[in-house]
Amino acid sequence: MESRLSLDALADALKARGIKVTAQRKAICRALAQAENHPTAVELRAAIADRHPHISLATVYRTMRMLCEAGIVEEHDFGVGCGHYELGGGPHHDHLIDAESGRIVEFCDPEIERLQQAIAERLGYRLTGHRLELYGVRAKSDA
Amino acid sequence: MESRLSLDALADALKARGIKVTAQRKAICRALAQAENHPTAVELRAAIADRHPHISLATVYRTMRMLCEAGIVEEHDFGVGCGHYELGGGPHHDHLIDAESGRIVEFCDPEIERLQQAIAERLGYRLTGHRLELYGVRAKSDA
DNA sequence: CTACCTGCAAAGTCTTTGCATTACG
DNA sequence: CGTAATGCAAAGACTTTGCAGGTAG
């Protein structure tokens, strides 16, 4: 169930880069790893507020930024006003956002990946990245 | 070359909804229609600054918002900090962003549209919208 | 003439930063 | 111990809003 970096592996990755493993960073990373959805900075802070009520939002942002730059975390904005964070290290995937509940479903479709590549080529570009988000509502199994 | 709303048609659309057609709105719409790329609010203001130096940024934002709600304009954020606007009414398309120049290329691929639909269904959802952005650099025709 | 629109400046979000203090390694 | 990290509050970037005056219809 843990195809992503484990917390220990994450700590090691930080140490290897000479980045200090502080209590704040551990708490934030644990919250991110345990989150079901892709939480925002505010949600991350809320998730650790009971055990670490004094961790500031600035530290959450700083930690996310640092981990993004280290390639350990990915940030998505999903068209809402604020960023959502996700522990990286897992296989590539895109997102389907439940327009009603806000739930985020991950998926990966090799066919669509291939098509994107082909489209970029057709337009004379070499693909360096992409963003694909589907928005939908749960299909009623017809009434 | 003008598969989108003409300026006259746009003015009529506003009148039909009881929205006043002011000099500011005309200028902003003309700038949007003539823009090559999908401009930001600041870029729109800059584009009309020589002939209408006193149109405020607030009015540009208000106009874009009004037109978005009227379904006449689309807003994209492209992952940068600020919104980009595009005159709607044309056929559906997605965007490829030149990571070097910022140039935006529009494309539409029926195959990829169909796949998105299929993916949503497979996940148990009815697709209500999507966002697809490709990021790339111009392909060298090999050295 | 009246209701809607505009400009200005102030406020609102989300995120980043300066600085003194704390703590990892 | 020394350097990097933290908390707090202030600043920044982008966008929205309150209000008094202006203008389309």
Image: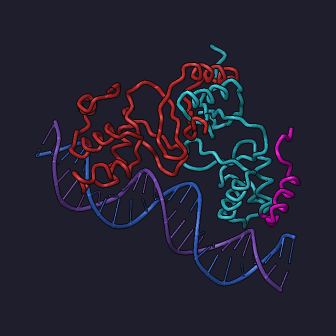
Chain colours: A cyan, B red, C blue, D purple
Taking C23 as reference, is A101 left or right? left
**Is residue B131 part of the magenta span, yes or no?**
no
Q: Quadrant of the N terminus of chain A?
A: top right
| Residue at point 37%, 43% (across, down) | B64
Taking A33 as reference, is B77 left or right? left
| Residue at point 75%, 42% (across, down) | A36
Q: Position of residue B32 (x, y in %)?
A: 33, 40
Quadrant in the rendering for residue A90: top right
Name the one closer to the observer, B23 or A49: B23
Residue B69 visible in the shown view: no
Q: Quadrant of the C terminus of chain A?
A: top right
Q: Is residue B28 above or below residue A139?
A: below
Taking B129 as reference, is A117 left or right? right
How many numbered callouts? Answer: 0
Single out the residue that lies furthest toward the top. Answer: A143
Magenta residues span A1-24
Q: Position of residue A136 (x, y in %)?
A: 60, 28
| Residue at point 68%, 52% (across, down) | A43
Q: Is residue A114 above or below residue B64?
A: above
Taking A93 as reference, is A10 left or right? right
Q: Is residue A71 above or below residue A111?
A: below
Residue A140 visible in the shown view: yes
Quadrant in the rendering for residue B5: top left
Q: Position of residue B119 (x, y in %)?
A: 66, 23
Q: Position of residue B54 (x, y in %)?
A: 24, 56
